[in-house]
Amino acid sequence: MILTKKSIMNKLYFVSGVMFIFALLVVYKLITIQFVQGAKYRVLAKQLTIKNDKITANRGNIYSVGGSLLATSVPKYDIRIDLVAPSEKNYNNHISALSDSLAIFYGTSSSEYRHQFNLARQNKNRYFLLARNLGYSQYLKFRNFPLLSLGAFKGGLIVEQSTKRDYPMGAIAQRSIGYERFDDFGNITRVGIDGAFGKKYLRGVDGRRRKQKIGKGQWKPIDDFNQLEPQDGYDVYTTIDVNIQDIAHHALLEQLEDFKADHGTVVVMETKTGDIKAISNLGRNNEGLYYERLNYAVGESHEPGSTFKLMALAVALEDKVIDTTTMIDTGKGVLSYYGKKVRDSKNGGYGNISIAKAFEVSSNTGIVKAIHRAYKDQPEKFVDGLYSMNLQDSLGLALIGEGRPIIPDPRTNNGRWSGIALEWMAYGYGVSFTPLQTLTFYNAIANDGVMVRPKFLREIKEIDTSIKTFQTETINPKICSKETVLKLQQLLKNVVKKEHGTAHKLYSKKFSMAGKTGTCQKNYSDKDQLNYISSFCGYFPSNNPKYSCIVVIHEPDKSVGYYGADVSGPVFKKIAQKIHTNSPMVDQVEDINKKSEIVVSDYNKYYEVTNNFKTVMPDLHGMSAMDAISILENLDLKVQVCGSGRVSKQSVKKGQKIISQSLIILELT
C-alpha cells in the first residue's frame, strides 16, 4: 500500500516537473518572440497583412499624323464598401439614401439593396462590391452617393482603379498600332507600335498605394491617398494618316472578300520621307471573317515572284551587260534548265522581243534568258549586285518580328544554291522578302535612287512638350546610277500604259501610275492543291511620285482569279485614285514679287506713248500687237495687222498728223 502510494506520488512529481519545464519553455519563447525577435516578427506580420500595391501608370496615347487618337488608356473603376468601417450613427443616417441612389442608378429595388447591406454588415463584410468597370464620370457620381461621400474611414468607400487600352478606330490597323496578347502561360506580350515603343516611351512610371489584408484573400486601401502617384507615359505621334489608312483597309478588305483569299497586306509609304501612311494586315478566321491577325507586311517573308524582276534588271543594267533595247528570243515560251522548265503565261511565248517589252509583258523566259546569258559564268557577280542595293539587309525596324531577306549565294554553304538558283532568282523564286522590304526598293526607284528607311514615328511628346523627333534615315543614298534609275522608271511606267503591259487595265487618263505585277506559285503540302501569291508594287503619280504602295494577297480563289494584275492591281488603283481625288495638286509660285524686264519695258513704253502723243502718229516699233492696237484705237484710228510678233513697220510715220478714222497698217515680225 505504501509502495503504491509512493509510486503514484513519484509519477505526479514527474508530470508536474515536465509541465513546469514546459511552462518555462513557453514563457522563454514568449519573451524571446516579444523582446529578442520581436522586430523581426512584427515586420513579418506587417508583410503578411499590409502591402504596397502597384498602381499601373496610364500608357501614353498613340496619335495619327493629323492628331486623331489611335490608342489611348481609359481609366476604369471598381467601387466597393467596407460595411464595418461606418459608425452606427453614420450607417443608420445614410444607408437608406445610399440604397435609393443605387436603385436609381441600376433601375432596381431600393429595399433589396437595404436588405443586402444589413445582411453584409451583420456578416462583417468589408469588401462589398457596388460597381465594376465604371468610367470616370460614373466614378465621380458614385463618390457623391450618401455614405460613400464620407470617404474611406467614415463611409467605408473603397476605390480600385485600373486602366484599359481603347482603340477608337476599332480593328483598323490594330495589329500595327499594337495591343496586348496573352501567351499560354498568361504572360502579356505587346505587339506593334505599342510594343516596340512601350518600355521606352509609352509605359510611364507605376505608383504605389498601401493596402491591408481583410481576409479571404481580399485587400482594401488603408489611406485615401497614394503613397506614390503614378506618372503617365509619353504620347507617341505616328506617321499614319487616318484617311489613307481607311482607304487602304477597305480596299484590301473588299478584294479579299471578293476573291475569298486567305490573307493579305497593303502598305502606303511617302516617297521622300519613308513615312508609313497606311498599313493594313487582314487574315481570315474560321468563320470567313477578316481581322488584323498578324503583321504580314513586316513579318511574313515570301518569294516575291515577278516583282523581283525589277531588282534583277537593275543589276544587269547597272553592270551594262544588257540594255532595255537588247533583243531576246523567247522562243515558244518555254525554257529548260537542268530538267526544270521556265514558262511564260502566254502559250507560244512572245517571239523575239526587247528587254523592255519582256518586262512590260512579264515574260519569264525573256528575263531568265537575259540573266542566264549575262551571269551564267559568274553568278556571284549577280548576287553582289543585289547586295550593293542593300537587298540582303533587314530594314532595322523598331517593330519586332521583321522577316529576314533570303538571297542564295554560290559562295556560302547553306544549301540554298543549286544549278538552277541563278535562273530561278531572275524571276523571283528562291529569294525571299517581306512586302515592306520589296516596297522599300521600289520606293528607292521612285525616289531617284535614294533608299530611305520606312518610318512609323514622327514625334514623342509629354502633353505639348516635344521630347524627341524622328527624322528620315537614308539606308543608301545611291543604290544605282541615275541612268539606270531613269530606265527602270520608264519600264515601270510602260507596265501601266494603255494597251501596253500586264497592268494596262489599271491605266487611267486622269492620273498616272507606275508599277509591276507579280504572280508567284506558293509552297503547298497537298500536291493536288496549287496556291498563288498575287502582288502589285509601284508608285504614283509616275512623274514626281508622292507615294509608293505594295499590295500582296495570298491564296485567292483560283476560280475567281489569281494574277497580280487582276487581284492586287485593282487595290493599288483604288488607293491611288482616292488619294489623288482627295489630294488636289497645288503649284507654288516661287517669287510673286519678281518682275519681268520685258513686261516692265512694254509697260513704260505704252504709257509714254499714250501720254505724249494725242494728235500725231506715235512710234510703235518694237511694241507688241496688243499694245499697238490698243493705242491706235484709243486715238480713234482703224488698224490692219499683217504677220505676228512685234511691230516692225507702220504705214504712217512717227510725228505725222493723224486724221480720225484713218486706216493704219502695221507689219509684225
Image (cartoon, grey):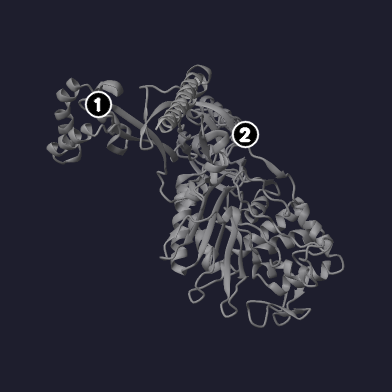
Nearer the observer, 450 or 489: 450
Q: Nearer the viewer, residue 274 or 283?
A: 283
Q: Quarter of the image holding residue 213?
A: top left
Q: Which residue is under mark 1?
A: 148
Measuring from the top left, give residue 10's x and y in whole percent.
46, 29
**Rendering coords of residue 495 (x, y %):** 62, 64
Say if 481 sits above or below 133 in the image.
below
Instruction: Give the class, few, some or many, for how many residues have Cα within 10 Å of label 1's Cα (few <14, many ≥20).
Output: many
Residue 598 is marked as: 2
Which label's residue is closer to the chain start, 1 or 2?
A: 1
Viewer can see residue 354? no
Q: Residue at x 15, y 28 (%)?
A: 97
Tell me: 539 left or right of 59: right
Classed neighbour count for the residue bearing mark 2: other residues with Cα under 10 Å, few (<14), some (14–19), many (≥20): few
What residue is drawn where x is 54% and y is 32%?
Answer: 460
Q: Looking at the rendering, in which quadrant would you find the N terminus?
A: top left
* Nearest to the observer: residue 130 or residue 497: 130
What amino acid does circle 2 point to?
Ile
Q: Going by the picture, which residue comes out furthest to the top? A: 35
Q: Position of residue 250 (x, y in %)?
A: 44, 56
x%, y% of residue 64? 48, 40
Badge 1 element: helix
218 versus 359 height, above or below: above
Whether residue 270 is visible, yes or no, is yes
User: Disc 1, disc 2: CB below 8 Å?
Assistant: no
Residue at image point 15% right, 34% down: 114
How many numbered callouts? 2
Q: CA distance from mark 1 to mark 2?
A: 85 Å
Give residue 390's mark: none
